[in-house]
Structure formats: C-alpha cells, structure tokens
Image (spheres, rainbow, N blue to C red):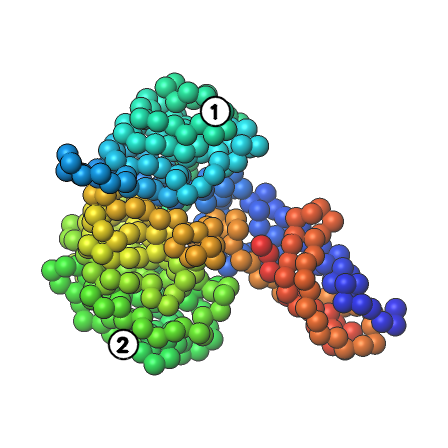
C-alpha cells in the first residue's frame, strides 16, 4: 500500500487496535482514568443517573401565606432511602426516555419510602414502603404512583445493595492519594513534576479542618483552606493549564463530630464542574483517616455559596442554606437538610458542557485513548479525524491520526 487517505488510515488503525468493550462499559486494556471502584455496567448506569444520592433527604421551602413563589427544584433524578419534602420538585430539568420501558433513564425518584409534597418528573421506583406525592408528571404514560412498583429487570441489582460500599471505598481511595498539585496565584494549578498519584487525576489536599480549628497548612503538601472557607474565592486565576481530560480532586479532611462550613461564595471560579471532585472525609484528632463507619461530621453550605462538581461526602450530615446552590452530583449516605435552595445538575451548572460527570461512572465522560498501530505507508501524514465508528457501532471519536515512519498513532476521544 503506497499511500492512504486519512479515512483509510483511521479505519486500519481502529481495526488493528481491536477496540472491545468489557461488561463494565470500559474498553478492555484501556482503563478509564475516571475509574476508581470496579462496577458493572448496570451499577455504573444507576450511579451515573442520579443528581443526588442520600441516606435521608429532608427538605422544606417555607413561604409566607401571602407570598407567591416557585418551589425549589432538584434538577435531576434523586435517590434516597427516605425522602420527606415540602415545596420541592424533582427531576425538573430532564426529560424521561419514554422508549426505555421501565428502565433506569425513566427514573425521576428512587426511594424505600417517601412523602413528597411536590411534583416528580419521570418514573417513581420504590423497593418497599410507600410513595406519596402531590403530582407525578406522567409524560411517558407511566403507571400511577400510588403503588409498590414491581422491580423491572434492569433494576434487579438494587442501588442500595452496592452503592453505600462503593461510595465509601471511592472516597477513601481518593483520600489515600498523595497530593501532587498546588495552587499558584499567578499560574493556577501547578505540579512539581509530571508524575501523578493516580492516572488522570490531579490531587490537591487541604489541611485537617473544622469551624473550630484548622491545622496550619504545609505548603509542600497542602493548599490553604481559603478555597472553601473564605468569602472570596482563591481561584481567581484562569487555569489554562488544566487538560480537558483531567479530573481535579480536592481532598478535604474534616474532624469527626465537628462542623465544616463552606463560606467561599464562588468555589469553582475557573474550574469546570465537569472536572472537579470535592472529597469530604472524616479524620481523627491527629488528622488521620477515621475508618469507623459510624464516624460523621456536619457539612454546611453557607448562604449564597455556589459549589459544583462531584461533591462526595458519604459520612457528612449536610445542612443546606436557602440561597446559593450545590450543583453537579451531591452524595451523602447520611442526612441532607434542605431549606429551599435548588440542587442543580451538571448540565445547568456547566452551561451544557457535560450532562454528567462522576468518579467511576464513566458514561458520557470524555475518555482519551492513545494506541500505536503499524501501517504500510510511505507518507508522513497529520490530520484530524472528524468521526469514526467501530464495526459494532460503539465508538464515536473526534481526534487525530499521525503517521510517521510507518507507525500510525491514533488519538481518539470517546463521547
């Protein structure tokens, strides 16, 4: 073969790479950099689906008798063991997939028991107990909500049978990584080397802290708590050195039985919600990870504060203020106490940049694959691939093909 068009090169490269999807949705041999905890594809779909996952969700939006105001919203689907809310609507920003009969994508609310004085958009699923809601937006012609739902096949693996363990393991795994990135006021995120504690992640760590006391931060290993505990954001530099495929992890150790209040008004500033994980976890008086499963702390979002991304706080009792918002995906296995603020989804807080972005749930997550494949050509070519689909129709890509000295390098981005 003397010469190849770009399309031909791309096709040969993909055939030789032999992209094959495993049961978990990852490409065999090419592990997602976002993956921390091994999960099945069904489990990935369940965890990825929800805007919020809670132990108990208790929320009320109070209004004066003469006041006319809109209700608060959880923009995406919600999952909780128990839900008790007044003045809150659920899944308001998403449309159910009516073609997916009783499937995960139809879910608007999943609980063991719930009392909802508000609207629920989408299917309601409960394993036991009862669901009472003021109104269900029945756009797919789904059944009445006043019943116990028979488990459909694709929900037979209950969220609650694996999620608590997976969420805790993921939080602890992230907490175990050594910090490799720091904040420079002029340069943004900087690292001492290209080495990473975990492939695809940049790890930043705050000192152990609460509202009562914070350890002085070590500039060689930690960043200042001002990123979360200042009225003005410390992220006032455009972080142009963040790659679109990197995840930014803020490890936030909180003293057990203490309270940590987020007071920085715009926490994200110039970091995309699609790329950031805030990992709040319990530590003892010495600052060491507290592995006692009963250990908890209180996480408060102060009025007007905005924080968005994957907010992972499995052992936090969360108290939410009536103004400002959490955005992205909010996770606690303890209690959430809401006072009228919305919980926004990834799509709304990222201006459509991403619809979902999670830790080990890589559906709809950018995934860069680089493989080198030998091809027979005498030309050196560099071009851009607009779109490729493998023979199974699984792999759409935007990326580049480079051929040098009979070696083709394909950089493909999984959508």
Q: Which quadrant of the figure contains the N terminus? A: bottom right
What residue sits 30% from the left and 51% below the top?
Answer: 326
Query: Tag 1: Cα neighbours inside 10 Å, few (<14), some, or many (≥20)?
Result: some
What residue sits 39% from the left and 58% below the top?
Answer: 273
Which residue reaches farthest right? 1
Q: Are marks 1 and 2 in contact (CB under 8 Å)?
A: no
Q: Position of residue 384 (x, y in %)?
A: 68, 68
Residue 114 sits above or below residue 352 on the image: above
Query: Would residue 305 be seen by someone viewing this image from the given angle?
Result: yes
Residue at image mark 2: 219
- What SS does tag 2 mark? loop
Looking at the picture, tell me which residue is in the foreground, 368 or 374: 368
Query: Would residue 199 be seen by someone viewing this image from the given angle?
Result: no
Which residue reaches farthest bottom? 186
Looking at the picture, tell me which residue is in the foreground, 30 or 363: 363
Q: Which quadrant of the figure contains the C terminus? A: bottom right
Residue 395 sits above or below residue 126 on the image: below
Which residue reaches farthest left? 212
What residue sits 27% from the left and 71% below the top?
Answer: 234
Residue 12 sits above or below residue 356 on the image: below
Residue at image mark 1: 142
- Which mark sits nearer the N-terminus, 1 or 2? 1
């Amino acid at each position: 073969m003397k010469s190849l068009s770009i399309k031909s090169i791309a096709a040969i490269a993909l055939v030789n790479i032999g992209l094959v999807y495993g049961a978990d949705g990852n490409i065999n041999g090419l592990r997602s950099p976002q993956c921390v905890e091994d999960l099945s594809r069904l489990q990935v779909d369940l965890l990825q689906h929800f805007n919020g996952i809670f132990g108990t969700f208790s929320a009320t939006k109070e209004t004066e008798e003469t006041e006319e105001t809109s209700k608060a919203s959880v923009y995406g689907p919600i999952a909780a063991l128990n839900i008790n809310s007044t003045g809150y609507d659920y899944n308001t920003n998403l449309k159910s997939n009516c073609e997916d009969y009783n499937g995960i994508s139809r879910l608007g609310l999943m609980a063991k028991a719930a009392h909802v004085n508000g609207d629920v958009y989408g299917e309601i699923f409960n394993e036991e107990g009862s669901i009472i809601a003021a109104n269900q937006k029945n756009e797919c012609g789904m059944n009445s909500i006043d019943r116990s739902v028979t488990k459909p096949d694709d929900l037979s693996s209950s969220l609650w049978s694996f999620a608590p363990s997976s969420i805790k393991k993921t939080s602890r795994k992230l907490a175990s990584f050594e910090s490799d990135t720091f904040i420079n006021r002029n340069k943004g995120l900087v690292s001492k080397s290209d080495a990473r504690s975990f492939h695809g992640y940049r790890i930043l760590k705050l000192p152990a802290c609460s509202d009562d006391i914070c350890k002085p931060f070590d500039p060689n290993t930690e960043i200042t708590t001002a990123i979360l505990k200042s009225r003005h954001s410390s992220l006032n530099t455009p972080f142009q050195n963040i790659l679109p495929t990197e995840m930014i992890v803020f490890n936030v150790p909180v003293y057990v039985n203490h309270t940590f209040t987020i007071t920085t008004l715009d926490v994200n500033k110039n970091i995309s919600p699609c790329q950031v994980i805030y990992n709040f976890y319990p530590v003892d008086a010495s600052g060491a990870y507290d592995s006692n499963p009963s250990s908890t702390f209180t996480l408060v979002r102060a009025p007007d504060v905005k924080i968005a991304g994957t907010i992972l706080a499995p052992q936090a009792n969360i108290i939410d203020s009536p103004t400002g918002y959490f955005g992205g995906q909010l996770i606690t296995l303890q209690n959430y106490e809401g006072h009228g603020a919305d919980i926004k989804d990834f799509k709304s807080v990222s201006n459509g940049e991403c619809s979902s972005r999670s830790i080990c749930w890589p559906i709809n997550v950018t995934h860069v694959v680089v493989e080198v494949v030998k091809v027979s050509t005498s030309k050196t070519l560099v071009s851009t691939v607009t779109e490729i689909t493998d023979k199974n129709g699984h792999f759409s890509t935007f990326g580049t093909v480079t051929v040098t000295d009979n070696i083709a390098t394909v950089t493909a981005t999984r959508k």
